[in-house]
Amino acid sequence: MKKITKCVIPAAGMGTRFLPATKALPKEMFPIVDKPVMQYLVEEAISAGCTEIIIVTGRSKRAIEDHFDSNPELEQRLGDSGKFDYLKKVKWLNDMANIVYVRQPYPKGDGDAILRTKNLIGDEPFLVLFGDDIIDNDPTAAEQLIRKHEETHAPIIATVWVENEEVSNYGILEWEQDWDTTKVTRFLEKPKAAETDSRTAVIGKYVLTGDIFTYLENAKSSVWDGEIRLADAFIAMQKDRDIYGLQVEWTRYDAGSKVWYLKACIAYAMKDKTIANEMQDFLKTI
Ligand code: G1P
């Protein structure tokens, strides 16, 4: 079986919910303590064995490329002034993986973003991590998804349990138990809570198989608003082959929402010994 070595990270979204901050700064570059969201995602992919990272970007996303590039002046200064800890952190960014960039010229949906990587992926399984989902867990969510793919050889969708009022914001999976996994029996994109008993929601982490591209290409013809959606490809694919959902215990932060982004900042600050106590004292005062 081919080992998963490639990870696609779609990052061309406009970040409307964070305007005006996202006018010039990509939301994927927002820091959680001292690392941008994008770095957490790339490190998650590496933790799961990926060596090729394909980031789908768009206009005004140049800061992402600069972050993973070398910065010789900065490196020289840090070295000259003996700040070797920082130098190590900075140099790791351009050593960590082979990162390539693909542009998505128009915001035409998550499926279109993935379709643009077709020639770079070929016919092999690959990991997909969307920028909004930060999951704090060891083993990482990506490791868990890949492990499940190695058992099943099938596409794997990461899921979380949601409350009734959240159902219509998510893809929802109906499923049946298949040994220790959950086989998807129906994929509903953003249904009303009354349309399904399931509260198993799709989040932005997947292992996809090479045949997804055919489903995405065919989904093109069915769309009414010019967008190509991964959800449409899943709905068609599920009729032809087994797809699995994977729900595990993990702490998830939706970094695409203001409140959850700020919760992530606080939670990660609490894990950083150099600032945790001061942060905690401050939080008690407000
Ligand atoms: C997309 C998908 C949806 C999924 C969600 C996860 O929706 O279409 O199936 O549950 O991502 O974040 P979006 O949030 O882009 O509207």
Image (cartoon, rainbow, N blue to C red):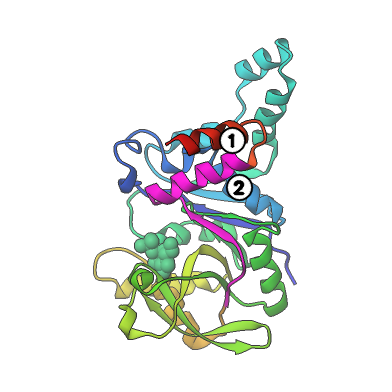
* Foreground residue among 33 and 7: 33
In the rendering, at what x and y percent does residue 32 appear? 53, 40
Residue range in magenta is 245-270
Location of residue 83 with respect to 58 vertically, above or below: above
Q: Residues within 10 Å of mark 1 (few under 14, many from 20)?
A: many
- Ligand 1: image quarter: bottom left
In the rendering, at what x and y percent does residue 177 appear? 60, 88
Is any part of residue 104 visible from this angle?
A: no
Residue at mark 1 to residue at mark 2: CA–CA distance: 10 Å
User: Which quarter of the picture shows residue 108?
Assistant: bottom left
Instruction: Tell me the element at label 1.
Output: loop
Location of residue 52 with respect to 73 vertically, above or below: below
Looking at this rendering, what residue extends furthest in the top direction? Answer: 80
Going from the N terminus, do you reach mark 1 or mark 2 first?
2
- Decide: marks 1, 2 in contact (CB < 8 A)? yes
Tell me the amino acid under the disc marked 1: Phe
Indicate the quadrant containing the C terminus: top left, top right, bottom left or bottom right: top left
Tell me the amino acid under the disc marked 2: Val
Q: How crowded is mark 2: few (under 14 residues within 10 Å), some or many (20 or more)?
A: many
Residue 249 lies within the magenta run: yes
* Foreground residue among 135 and 94: 135
Residue that label 1 marks: 68
In the rendering, at what x and y percent does residue 15 appear? 35, 46
Residue that label 2 marks: 42
User: Which quarter of the picture shows residue 147?
Assistant: bottom right
